[in-house]
Amino acid sequence: MKYGILGDIHANLCALEAVLAGLADAEVEVLLAVGDVVGYGAAPAACLDLLRQYEVAVVLGNHEQAVIEGAAAWGFNHAALAAVSWTRDQLSRTDRAWLAQLPLLRIFDHALLAHASPAAEDGFPYVLNAADADGALDGLSRPVCFVGHTHVPATFMRTVQDPVRTAISHDSFIDLSDTELALVNVGSVGQPRDGDPRAAYAVYDSDRRTLRIERAVYDVEREAARITGACLPASLAERLFVGR
């Protein structure tokens, strides 16, 4: 089975369209999204429509929770709060109901899907290093789990030869055939933070057990203009040019 995994789209329509085109070329069979479809960007409704059109399986992210519940936005910075408030006003009742029914975890034949960590029953902890990843890896019911949240691609894994130690790789291609467990952060479609402004996404072949982090060029200027045109904080547009 070939999976295409989208992380942290954040209402960036141009980036999403570019990534979906890349996944079509890769002939993936199943499309997944690790949450935070909304927030920051200025095309939330259009992005939701595309995900439903392509029958993408999505999990709940903290920005969806903030849009639904309001109180969950506490702890967000000024720009994120402004985007949450604006997004709530842009979405229809149907859109908000669709977000509200998203699960925290999805289980597939070959993989798990979560926003931050499959071990988190409440909240969205950041998995930034091997120590953070240990708890998530300990509880995996599938050999691979896809996550996002940090906007930085990374693979945390335990090999068959060394099943106790958690290693980390930032390589764009990883052969997981000798890996016992892996937690894969697929990066961000709509707001990368690893210094590469191109949209990030992942392709996983469960038969070959290979993972590839791909990048897609998109019209950053158009998407930045959409953000500023919506009177959202300028910083949300400016960071798209630098991938930070």
Image: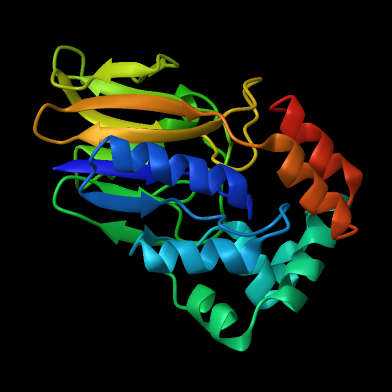
Q: Position of residue 118 (x, y in %)?
A: 38, 50
Q: Position of residue 64 (x, y in %)?
A: 60, 65
Q: Position of residue 123 (x, y in %)?
A: 57, 57
Residue appearing at x 74%, y 63% in the figure: 73
Which of the image's four quarters has the N terminus? top left
- Give the colour scheme of this rendering: rainbow
Label count reads 0
Residue appearing at x 53%, y 83% in the figure: 97
In this view of the protein, which residue sits in the foreground, 217 or 145?
217
Which of the image's four quarters has the C terminus? top right
Q: Position of residue 199 (x, y in %)?
A: 55, 34
Residue appearing at x 73%, y 74% in the figure: 90
Regarding residue 232, the answer to whether it shows in the image is no
Q: Is residue 95 left or right of residue 236?
A: left
User: In which image quadrant can residue 75 be found?
Assistant: bottom right
Residue appearing at x 56%, y 52% in the figure: 124
Q: Is residue 54 left or right of residue 13?
A: left
Q: Is residue 11 left or right of residue 31?
A: right
In this view of the protein, which residue sits in the foreground, 24 or 183?
24
Q: Residue furthest bottom?
A: 93
Regarding residue 53, the answer to whether it shows in the image is yes
Where is 63 relative to 160, above or below? below
Where is 67 relative to 176, above or below? below
Q: Is residue 164 left or right of residue 94?
A: left
In this view of the protein, which residue sits in the foreground, 215 or 35?
215
